[in-house]
Image: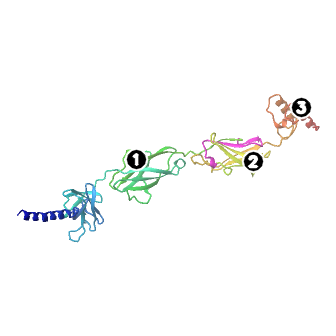
Amino acid sequence: MKRKRGWLFYPLMIVALLLCAIPAYADTPTLPHAFYGTLTIGGSSASVGTVVKAKVGGVECGSITTTVAGQYGGSGAFDAKLTVSGDIATGATINFYANNSIADQTYAFSAGAVTELNLTVEVPTDTTPPSVNITALTPDPTKDNTPTFTGTATDTLSNISSVQYKVDSGSWTAASASDGAFNSTSEGYTFTTAALSNGAHTVYVRATDSASNTTLEANYASDSFTVDTIVPSVASTSPANGASNVAVDTTVTVTFSEAMKASTITTGSFTLVADSTSVSGSVSYNSGTYTATFTPSADLLEDTTCTATLSTAITDAAGNPLASAYSWSFATIGAVVPGDATGDGLVDARDITKVERIIAGLDAATPGADATEDGLIDARDITKVEMIIAGLG
């Protein structure tokens, strides 16, 4: 009997060893949980093309796109369904989304199940006002009292329906969309203000979205700028208008009432004519004194009437031109006749008296009083004048 029981032990050991040698297989994959049903968004049937997603713990586990309005998936055995799959524990909560808005319904995961679940999604209430900003003012408002503004209006949920602006405490005025119509959540706009008066101004911009939210007053886009509409004028000239006996080597200057734009003051806009003949020269501008200078290329002719002219091409720093062209004239000194102290073209007894008065310090020196042309006016010039009168000089 003992020998027989020993033979039974060994076959059992062999079977055990064979069982231990059989490899262990991985766990069977979790079967998906399939869903289908109706889909309502904001009280209306969802449109074709709506994307429905399922998430577990914030991780997307399946999605489907609607092909029939108001319905996702189908009940038929071969109809597409929203399949939720992955390493998901039984009973885990599934959240559903339509176009990224969460549905009111949830469901516990059950591997291999097929569930009809009607989903409803509430449209979030849009109470956020749009934001606006000004990106450019063109042209520079300091040189145009009807500046054009550009900018953008941005909203997080609804489309922009309108953009308005006002200047200072004026009334709101509609702006136009850059593409012709306000139809997105980020719109460009442009507008041109009405004519503005000279001084400091502030422009405000606000936007309204399709949910009737309007930019809060504290958040209006605003920009301040100064409009200069003052026309520049001529303050003084040298030589003065109507001056005579002007030296032939003179330069012609004009001082303006305000700062000017130097690039507009050229030989084309600041000209000089001598007896109907254009005078060549160069023009410069001193921004510190508001003074422009015309320097002739050569001395002017004697006994000549010269006319300087400023055209309306000349503007101030803000771009305002002279109200009209401005001209003034002066005469250069005549040819000097030695002994003609009075400058009347004659040498006679009156010139003797003039020289005497100059020597006595009663009159200012004149070129003709230096009859001897030695650079001095003294008694010898009286004698020279007397000789000229007597025909001896």
Q: Which residues are magenta?
A: 240-264
Q: From the image, tell me which residue sits under label 3.
A: 380
- Spot occupied by residue 107 in the image (x, y as percentages of width and height): 20, 58
- Spot occupied by residue 353 in the image (x, y as percentages of width and height): 85, 32
**Dots 3, 2 in contact, CB < 8 A:** no
- Spot occupied by residue 70 in the image (x, y as percentages of width and height): 25, 65
Q: Is residue 25 magenta?
A: no
Identify the disc placed on residue 205.
none
Q: Residues under labels 1 and 3: Cα distance?
A: 87 Å
Q: Quadrant of the image for the C terminus?
A: top right
Q: Residues within 10 Å of mark 3 (few under 14, many from 20)?
A: some
Q: Secondary structure at mark 1?
A: loop
**Dots 1, 2 in contact, CB < 8 A:** no
- Spot occupied by residue 106 in the image (x, y as percentages of width and height): 21, 57
Q: Residue furthest left?
A: 1
Please give the name of the residue rendered at 37% of the width and 51% of the height, measured from the top-left corner. 130
